[in-house]
Image (tube, rainbow, N blue to C red):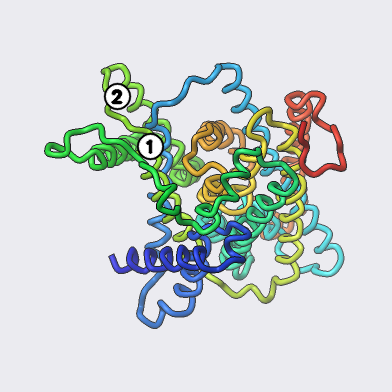
Amino acid sequence: MIHCGIVSAALLLGAFLRAKVRIFQKYLIPSSILGGIFLLLFYNYVSPLFNLSSDFLGDLVYHLLNISFIAMALRIPEKVEGSKSRRALGANVIAVVAQYGLQCLLALIAVSIMIATVFPDLFPAIALTLPLGFELGPGQAYSMTLPWEAMGFEGGTSVGLAMAAIGFIVGSVGGVALINIGIRQGWVSADDAAKLESGGVRSGFLPRALQKEGARNTTEGESLDSFSYHFALIFFTYLVSYGLLSFISFLLHFAGSLGDELVQSLWGINFIFSMFCANIVRLFMTKMNLSHTIDNKTFNRINGVSVDFTVISSLGSISLAAVASYWLAVLVLVAVGIFITCFILPWYCSRLYDDHQFKRMLLLFGTATGTLPTGLSLLRVVDPDFETPVATDYVYASGVVFFLVIPIILCANLPAASYAQSNPLLYWIMVAISFAYTLACIVCYRIFSGKKAFAKPRTLFYTD
């Protein structure tokens, strides 16, 4: 409860600053990100004086992320044309897998150049801290770099966490910059731009005249509060998801060490299983004629709470570890990451998608630099109530993406092994795998985008 109070205090401070400081209003910096910066400083420099660890924040982030997607999946969906939905799924898969391929490939090439020139003793697996920190997040960056320390990567976990921290900064600052550029360049639709320019959006608080109802009651209050009913549905679904993933983990243990490694990865993407179970629960309720008891706006509010507290806790949980001995390599990898996410990603997303191009790009940008909550936080700036299918489409695609990138996850130790075994061939096998993924995505991109694939090549964000 003490940690929840500290997180809440930081969130309120962020909301106050957003409401009062014009520069934060001008650049539409979310209150959760402002509060997260203070939380980051507090847990790195102040909380140790009181024996308060930030470990709890990592657990909070993990569970809130799952709750967020359960809340989205339990909503009664609007009817969408099947072909349109399938196309969105395919486009999302291509866009996300392309980030894995590009970040791995270009980072590996950059590190090989540094090893051949100015940094001959550089641990080669440091290249993969870019996709681990940017594309996956601090949890995976820590867990996957931990074994590398025993293989010769001194301070590997610190580098991984530092890369994740920088990714959050790039995602927050770069995302807000993209939103403001999008407003000026007309990438944002006229309706969305008008909403963003309203006083309530800029300050973060709605004036009294513009305040509106955010949910409706579907239960009799004397029996059960409507919010309690919706919370119960979410936590029941989470329990079902936990049971399913525990059963799958039990079966995979029989596959030996390979199965154990896959189990760790599966628990890291628990939100996919949570969303799957939420869909099963929703379909069951529909069959039982209980769908009228679900209020989408209530789930929107619960999802909003989860996103706010997830984003601020994510920033607060980052440890600012010392990486002085790797500063050059970190700077080079960050520059590569910025080039991929801030320039290549908007370029191909604007040509790949047929609808909600800017919103889809914004969500993908946030997840390719920080974590999924970062992408959701940026998306919520232009889609406050998640009224579009952008977030839901992304999560469905994430399930497919996970299975497609299993080879990358399983081969991530090759560069480290190449150092430990003095076998450079292992490093270049990883380069070849990354190249194969990138090439496959380019081919699929060309097929999906059609005539738009290379239209106006000098234009960062293509618009019809």
User: In the displayed structure, does residue 226 sit left or right of residue 186?
Assistant: left
Where is residue 389 drawn, in percent x and y?
53, 31
The residue positioned farthest toward the front in the image shown:
209
Relative side of 362 to 433, left or right? left
| Residue at x-position 40% and y-position 37% | 274
Query: Residue farthest to the bottom?
Result: 49
Q: Which residue matches tag 2?
A: 292
Q: Say what amino acid the circle numbered 2 marks.
A: His
Q: CA distance from mark 2 to mark 1?
A: 13 Å
Q: Residue at x 39, y 71 (%)?
A: 53
Label whose residue precedes the other's in the sequence (2 or 1): 2
| Residue located at (73% from left, 25% from top) | 448
Instruction: Give x and y (percent) for residue 461.
Output: 76, 41
Which three-letter amino acid code belongs to the residue tagged 1?
Lys
Question: Viewer-proximal residue, 265 or 359?
Answer: 359
Residue identified by numbered label 1: 297
